[in-house]
């Protein structure tokens, strides 16, 4: 388990004077996803999810007061204070709205923002969290212990709540990571956040959440057990619920792959759904609808396979943008002599942002590596396709 580097920025919020530490990852043009950390952790918490998420989103990670190198104003705080920090950060960064994935304290902040500033939240993931965690005295006691003994004094007791014993025994790297995050938290910031949880009750606010919501947690989480998660999900209109077997409170670290898969499915849709969106974006609604109308009971499973696997699982993977995938597709079709499918993907390449000149460069490249006859046929197909597009556009132009 590796830690994120320290290349983060700071901004002082004009609304509150609080200084927030944050970091961007992912392409600037992508939709924004905020990752909100749990109590006692930092943005390093999201290491297992970052690779999958930053390929699809512009990921914004930030630190709670006194966590991860962020300064800690004197406590106590309220959940409203911490929620206002996130809203203020989005305003300063000129982000009108974003999806939010919050774990534990981060989930509490996320549900506050979703219920008090709903215009800011597109989609919501509430992980290993709850709208209230009584009794308050437990949190006041923990705050006092942090102030007197430092956050490191809480490590052993918290590790038992965060993970199962067998997981800790087999993953010393994860233990070292959470230990580093916890001990780096300032005592006053940690204690102030404890006091925010002590005073919190967002139960009545859950009905005000309008953003599509996923509730996710661990089956063996002693802090927010499945029954608590189910009750919260029932109070949020249309919310989904995923309970991960073999996971405790920091479920994203104990079951990273299944956690990430559930979050991605909620934020961008399951493979079949996102495959349909990408297929339509690349090939066009008319083509997709025509293919569906021609589909029969015999080939319907194949159509579903292509939508789910090729378009939903490959074309949506992080690592390559859509124009690069279009270039590769054109080159492979030429190499394999699939000229009957080339017009469809030539049109798709144009929709993906390639110019005709760039397509010509791709075809010229195939002349070198696939052979002149194949490229000659491809250039002819491309010219006919472009002529058809020009004729159709000319016919549709107002006169």
Image (cartoon, rainbow, N blue to C red):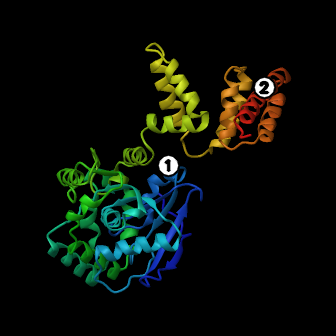
Judge whether 332 appears above or below 108 on screen: above
Looking at the picture, how far across and down is residue 188, in whole percent?
Answer: 33, 82
Looking at the picture, how far across and down is residue 102, in whole percent?
Answer: 36, 60
Judge whether 237 appears above or below 371 on screen: below
Dot 1, how many residues are within 10 Å of its Cα: few (below 14), some (14-19), or many (20+)? some
Judge whether 48 appears above or below 89 on screen: above
- First in sequence, mark 1 or 2: give its number: 1
The residue at the point 33 percent across, 80 percent down is 187
Q: Closer to the observer: label 1 or label 2?
A: 2
From the viewer's perspective, tell me whether residue 315 is left or right of residue 326. Answer: left
The residues tagged by marks 1 and 2 sit, at their Cα atoms, a distance apart of 39 Å
From the viewer's perspective, tell me whether residue 108 is left or right of residue 364. Answer: left
The residue at the point 81 percent across, 34 percent down is 365
Closest to the observer, 307 or 261 = 307
Pointer 1: what residue? 52
Closest to the observer, 366 or 277 = 277
Q: Mark 1 falls on what kind of element?
A: helix
Closest to the observer, 3 or 168 = 3
Judge whether 378 appears above or below 146 on screen: above
Answer whether residue 186 is visible to the viewer in this image.
yes
Pointer 2: what residue? 384
């Amino acid at each position: 388990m590796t830690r994120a580097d320290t290349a983060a920025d700071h901004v002082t919020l004009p609304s509150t004077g609080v200084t927030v530490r944050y970091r961007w990852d992912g392409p600037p043009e992508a939709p924004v996803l905020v990752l909100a950390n749990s109590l006692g952790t930092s943005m390093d918490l999201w290491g297992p999810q970052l690779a999958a998420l930053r390929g699809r989103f512009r990921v914004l990670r930030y630190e709670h007061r006194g966590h991860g190198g962020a300064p800690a104003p004197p406590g106590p705080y309220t959940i409203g204070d911490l929620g206002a920090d996130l809203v203020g950060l989005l305003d300063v960064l000129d982000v009108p709205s974003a999806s939010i994935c919050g774990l534990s304290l981060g989930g509490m902040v996320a549900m506050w923002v979703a219920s008090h500033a709903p215009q800011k939240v597109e989609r919501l993931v509430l992980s290993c969290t709850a709208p209230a965690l009584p009794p308050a005295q437990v949190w006041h006691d923990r705050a006092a212990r942090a102030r007197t003994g430092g956050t490191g004094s809480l490590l052993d007791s918290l590790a038992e709540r965060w993970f199962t014993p067998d997981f800790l025994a087999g993953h010393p790297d994860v233990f070292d990571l959470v230990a580093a995050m916890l001990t780096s938290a300032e005592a006053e910031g940690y204690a102030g956040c404890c006091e925010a949880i002590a005073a919190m009750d967002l139960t009545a606010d859950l009905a005000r959440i309008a953003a599509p919501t996923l509730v996710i947690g661990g089956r063996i989480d002693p802090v927010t057990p499945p029954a608590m998660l189910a009750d919260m999900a029932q109070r949020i209109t249309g919310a989904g619920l995923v309970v991960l077997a073999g996971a405790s409170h920091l479920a994203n670290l104990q079951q990273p792959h299944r956690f990430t898969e559930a979050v991605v499915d909620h934020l961008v849709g399951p493979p079949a759904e996102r495959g349909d969106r990408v297929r339509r974006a690349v090939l066009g609604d008319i083509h997709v609808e025509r293919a569906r109308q021609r589909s029969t009971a015999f080939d319907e499973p194949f159509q579903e396979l292509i939508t789910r696997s090729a378009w939903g699982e490959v074309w949506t993977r992080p690592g390559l943008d859509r124009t690069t995938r279009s270039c590769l597709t054109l080159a492979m079709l030429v190499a394999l002599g699939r000229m009957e499918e080339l017009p469809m993907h030539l049109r798709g390449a144009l929709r993906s942002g390639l110019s005709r000149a760039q397509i010509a460069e791709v075809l010229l490249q195939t002349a070198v590596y696939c052979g002149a006859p194949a490229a000659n046929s491809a250039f002819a197909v491309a010219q006919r396709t472009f002529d058809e597009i020009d004729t159709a556009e000319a016919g549709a132009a107002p006169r």
